[in-house]
Image (cartoon, coloured by chain):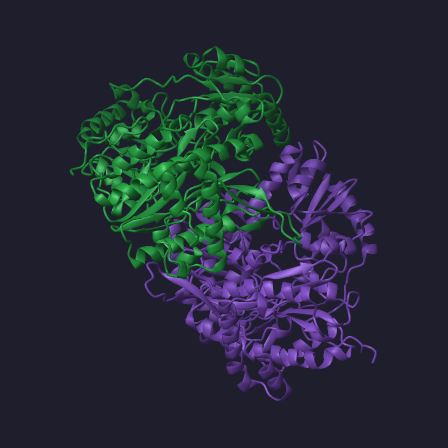
Chain colours: A purple, B green
Amino acid sequence: MSASPAPACRFQSFTDPCDPAQVAPRLAALRAALAGLGLDGFVVPRADEHQGEYVPAHMARLAWLTGFTGSAGNAVVLADKAALIVDGRYTIQSVAQTDTALVTPTRMEETPLGAWVEANLPAGGRLGYDPWLHTVDGLAKLEKAVEAAGGELVPTVLNPIDALWSDRPAPPVAPVTVHPRALAGEDAAAKLARIREALAREKVDALVLSDPHALAWTFNIRGGDVEHTPLPLGYAILPREGRPTVFLAPKKLGNEAGDAIGAVADIAAPEALAGRLKALGAEGATVLLDAATASAALASLIREAGGTPRAGTDPTALMKARKNETELAGARAAHLRDGAAMVRFLAWLSRTALAGGLTEIDAVAALEAERLRTGLLRDVSFTTIAGAGPNAALPHYRVTEASNRPIAPGIFLVDSGGQYEDGTTDITRTVAIGTPDAEMRDRFTRVLKGHVAISRAVFPKGTSGAQLDVLARLPLWQAGLDFDHGTGHGVGSYLSVHEGPQRLSKLGHTALEPGMILSNEPGYYKEGAYGIRTENLVVVEPRRVEGAEREMYGFETISWCPYDRALIDPALLDEGEIAWIDAYHAQVLAKLAPIVDGEAKAWLQESCRPL
Amino acid sequence: MSASPAPACRFQSFTDPCDPAQVAPRLAALRAALAGLGLDGFVVPRADEHQGEYVPAHMARLAWLTGFTGSAGNAVVLADKAALIVDGRYTIQSVAQTDTALVTPTRMEETPLGAWVEANLPAGGRLGYDPWLHTVDGLAKLEKAVEAAGGELVPTVLNPIDALWSDRPAPPVAPVTVHPRALAGEDAAAKLARIREALAREKVDALVLSDPHALAWTFNIRGGDVEHTPLPLGYAILPREGRPTVFLAPKKLGNEAGDAIGAVADIAAPEALAGRLKALGAEGATVLLDAATASAALASLIREAGGTPRAGTDPTALMKARKNETELAGARAAHLRDGAAMVRFLAWLSRTALAGGLTEIDAVAALEAERLRTGLLRDVSFTTIAGAGPNAALPHYRVTEASNRPIAPGIFLVDSGGQYEDGTTDITRTVAIGTPDAEMRDRFTRVLKGHVAISRAVFPKGTSGAQLDVLARLPLWQAGLDFDHGTGHGVGSYLSVHEGPQRLSKLGHTALEPGMILSNEPGYYKEGAYGIRTENLVVVEPRRVEGAEREMYGFETISWCPYDRALIDPALLDEGEIAWIDAYHAQVLAKLAPIVDGEAKAWLQESCRPL
């Protein structure tokens, strides 16, 4: 009954490729290179030139240098010290992955990048940076800090790491595919017309699409250049009048994609981007850059040629966030299929787990296998978070062979999703293995109350996610508890599982609008013991309220999978909450019973009984 | 039974001094003056040089020019057109007060100042402005708009209106008084030491106090230069090291105030301010300016002399907001006294109103008289809002002889407060005159549920007012209703009834901290029919929660006055809400019964029965 060897997954691995022993020689080599360039230090962000959540392997310079593989962070290397500045999610991971004798892991919440530079850069120190890896705003903050330290910020022409990185992977050239109108719901030409209207309103001469999500959405294309998100890495320039130019490596473009893009835009190689920006600048153009993703290098190219770069909001972000009816129909279909996979997985888990012998990796593999059985899975939408016991207390946990724990009596949390061509899913269920204790049931039920409060919310047009976030926290606050992440994020349509600008978080100031998809995922984490999170995706929809004086909205839930009744304490629920949960379970049963069978169907029927 | 002539009030008047007929000649005179200065236009903000909510009479240039007396707005005068740009509160008032044939009232929410200028300033147009009346940020926005219009922004040395204003009042010179340590709870010297620490942390050489509230708080002084807030208009410069300088007109300073200030600071005339700022600039000093209240003129004086003005957060704002134990004890005492006055007033109203013959002005006078009876009233804390029927639907209504309505069966709303030396009060009660209808009871009860939800809130350290605001709205949202103002504002300690940075509003991103006083005042407004608002003041306090994992806070309610039970529909309340209201009423009775008598006491006892 020993655990079997780690099963293979198509889309996920369980290795930790980092080796802290590499840090010393690489750091030394970088310092030597900096000295040769006359620099006293260098900033190494985790970001690539698109500020993406996933970066292609050849852009993983922070991981190459420090060993740290988290999704956000910055290293600063000075002559005699180096810091790895990461947010609270990554405190433990940064310590484990880097050589702490040489690189000091530093909590961003206490010492952000600017503060560390201000405190540590010697007066007169020349701090190098790669202008392709910093946004205009980010650079402005860094500049302030360097100024306060009495130093100088120096752009590098080539990133000095690239010359030292002997086995650096090649840039990805995954084929670009067409995202057909039957799934996108709107032609690229129609989208371009809407964008041109926005540019006219903004009084700019052109827009640079620096966010590959925007590129994918605008031209109805998808790619495969990074993990788990079907992105083609590239750029586009959209003039207010005239044909756009799409910048994509020619190797990525087959006939079909080339023809589709070519119907509405010119196509150029990425190497041509700088020249085109300079040409725009030379015409004196005002060019809108996406403040969130455009690098300072783009702004410099335009400015130095005589143009006016204006960092602002990419108008496609909000257009992309409001899904049309076709995209919503796709999302509903994807979620039914995905819910059935979840039910088959949870039914298997409930039959198997208590007997022992299962590990987190087994669960990840089994769930991916169930999604593959749909025949339509293109990828998982992110690395599955499967946490047993104390691992579940890490909200962004990723299991590796080193961290892998047996699924033992207690609590098991699975946060996962799939990429289907008709929709991106993201769902979390927390289940009891064996009989949960009273505290676990109390915490689970409070989290569920918050989740239900979001599901049932009715709110006027103009309300932001920042206003609603608190509804998910109140039942925890009443017991002196809370969770340290937002309640929900936007989700794309066969694009990123994390999509702005909408979010349910105290930072989510974008008004919620019909068609936006959001996650609803409050949690509770007891360090070293267990973690709880419950997540569905919801769609903002107009809501008729009898006698209403305002235009009202609410949420349509589109994820279908039962909550674990063993963890629910009905004594903590009011009538309205019980009614909502029973109605949800009745819908889950009605929707999924026809598409699951055998033991899974029996488990589903048992799980969906009224409370 | 006819209404008696308007009774006299000590602190409030009911006249509307504006005369739209004055607009034409004044506008013509200004245009002639602008032509003489080579200007094509001029911006006339409502603001004085301190960006105050109340401005002294000689600074009321916007009212002089346009007739508009609201508390916020801007006029822009061009050669052939003029706009009066005000927010939604003042749409109706701006139309009534100005000459709409010559000045176009414009809604700020649709066309803010910048947008109007951008759309209307002719290319090449020179737009004048008085640099003492615009903040650095405000000016930057205006500059952007003028640039987009292809015009030029031109500072004036003297405001051209001042030369045209023949009967301009003199600047106020109300005596400055000492706010004793027994009320302030902390010496000026101790406050200055804390400020110096903050300046060291901020790495600035000096701070300019441009907000008279900051001046009053820091030096423990009060004044009488504007209505309803005991402010001494003036400035101070606080160097990080060395003695501060306070700039106050010598006429305002008697021996006591002069000695008190002189113990910790030098005193200079306001005319000396510019010279001192230039001297700081010449030393190369970095000077912190309060972004909210410092005029662009201050920044220019420093910059042009070679210094670095840094617009930021005045550190005294947060210090002032966190009341100490002495200030809180004072606030509690003031609120008991003020609650008794409210009870005597409401008891009188309940005996008298149904018989008819009372007007809104009668109510304002009666309530002021009850506050005067305390013997300790220094002023009302703002112009009383007393609205009968449809007037109550205007959240910022001020009764004039022209608008005065009889108090007739239906709903009557009174929002008022007092300035006592130990505390500033602000309370709103909405009462039924006769028997209210079912809709009124429904709306009142929903507003009360929101008010109770705020009162009962328990939240972790770090929570902002923006996060809590929604709690006051949920019961209205459930019926498709809402209200268009924040749920609460900060309140000063014998200072302004509107004090930042804390607020209960979606814009209130300051974390709530123990000792902060806030209003809790949700409402509901039915245009043309009636309005409802219920308001208490609350103090943020630490809260022990059994088993809590976080540091938790809650609100201590300090306003004492019954809610009108005739307007409460208990069927809409849950057990917890009823228990809270009953407990509150029991406390109101216990606290106020000993200090009211006769018919007021009988009314109080009746009003405080359990629901």
Q: Pick out the residue farthest to the bottom.
A: A598
Vertical position of residue A177 compared to residue B192: above or below = below
x then y, percent, for residue A168? 73, 59
> What is the quadrant of the N terminus of chain A in the image?
bottom right
Which image quadrant is residue A232 in? Answer: bottom right
- The residue sitting at 49% across, 72% down in the picture is A579
> What is the quadrant of the C terminus of chain A in the image?
bottom right
Which of the pair A456/B36 is nearer the observer? A456
Which of the pair B420/A203 is nearer the observer? B420
x then y, percent, for residue B77? 27, 33
- The residue sitting at 39% across, 43% down in the picture is B604
x then y, percent, for residue B538? 49, 42
Which of the pair B508/A446 is nearer the observer? A446
Which of the pair A267/A108 is nearer the observer? A108
Q: Is residue B108 visible?
A: yes
x then y, percent, for residue A178? 51, 72
Q: Is residue A226 visible?
A: no
